[in-house]
Image (cartoon, rainbow, N blue to C red):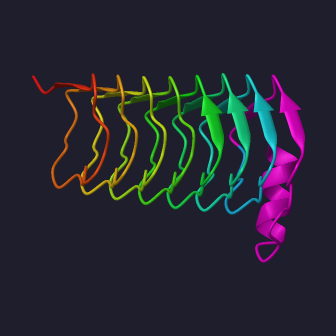
Amino acid sequence: SGSWNQWRRANPAVRPNLAGVKFYRKNFVGYNLQGVNFRDAEFGFCTFTKLNLSGANFEKAYLQGARFTDVLLANAKFDTAFIYGVSFTRTNLVRASFSRADLELDGFDDSDIGNASFEHALLTGAYFSNSLLKQAVFREANLRDAFFARSDLTGVDFTGAQKDGTYFLNK
């Protein structure tokens, strides 16, 4: 990650375009991937640890079995992405957008998800634990069998959301 980050510091105006690239079992540790375009990219069982992905574009990306730990994803776009069995742990997802994304069986643990948008998203079996969801938007989302445990839901907008089997545990 050292040479990549050095290049990023020397070229701050360049927005790397990795659209459509396929990654499998790649470990991303300590990289500055702020604002990188990963549109239509594929990530199979990749690990993202202690890195900056703020403002990154994951629109229409395919992520399966990926792990995000201690990652900055503020303002990232995951609109219409397929995100299956992915875990977000101690991750900053403030103002991230997951509009119309498929987020089945994903886990959000100890993360800040404030002001994030999950409008019209499919979150079947998603798990939110010890997370800050202040002002998050789940309008018209499918939350069937989702689980919210010990998470701050202050001001969350669930208007029109399907909540069949959704479980809320706040103690």
Q: Which sits in the foreground, 45 or 4?
A: 45
Name the residue at the left extreme. 171
Report whether 153 appears left or right of 139: left
Residue at the spot x=81%, y=22% of the render?
A: 25
Name the residue nearer the viewer: 72 or 10.
Answer: 72
Q: Is residue 134 left or right of residue 21?
A: left
Quarter of the rendering occupied by the C terminus: top left
Instruction: Tell me which segment is drawn in magenta.
Output: 1-30
Q: Quadrant of the N terminus?
A: top right
Question: Which residue reaches farthest bottom?
Answer: 13
Q: Residue at x 61, y 51 (%)?
A: 52
* Residue shown at the point (65%, 38%) measured from the top left: 82
Name which quarter of the figure residue 76 lies in. Answer: bottom right
**Residue 160 in the image: above or below residue 85:** below
Position of residue 17 relative to residue 48, above or below, is below
Q: Is residue 9 magenta?
A: yes
Please state the horizontal and vertical placement of residue 9, each as a whole percent of the image. Answer: 77, 65
Decide which of 112, 19 is in the foreground and name it: 19
Q: Position of residue 149 (x, y in %)?
A: 23, 25
In this view, the residue in front, 114 or 157, is: 157
Residue 115 x/y as whole percent: 34, 59
Position in image of residue 45 (x %, y %): 73, 22
The reply to whether the magenta stretch includes residue 105 is no
The number of callouts visible is 0
Above or below, comparing residue 65 to residue 98 in the picture? above
Q: Quadrant of residue 63?
A: top right
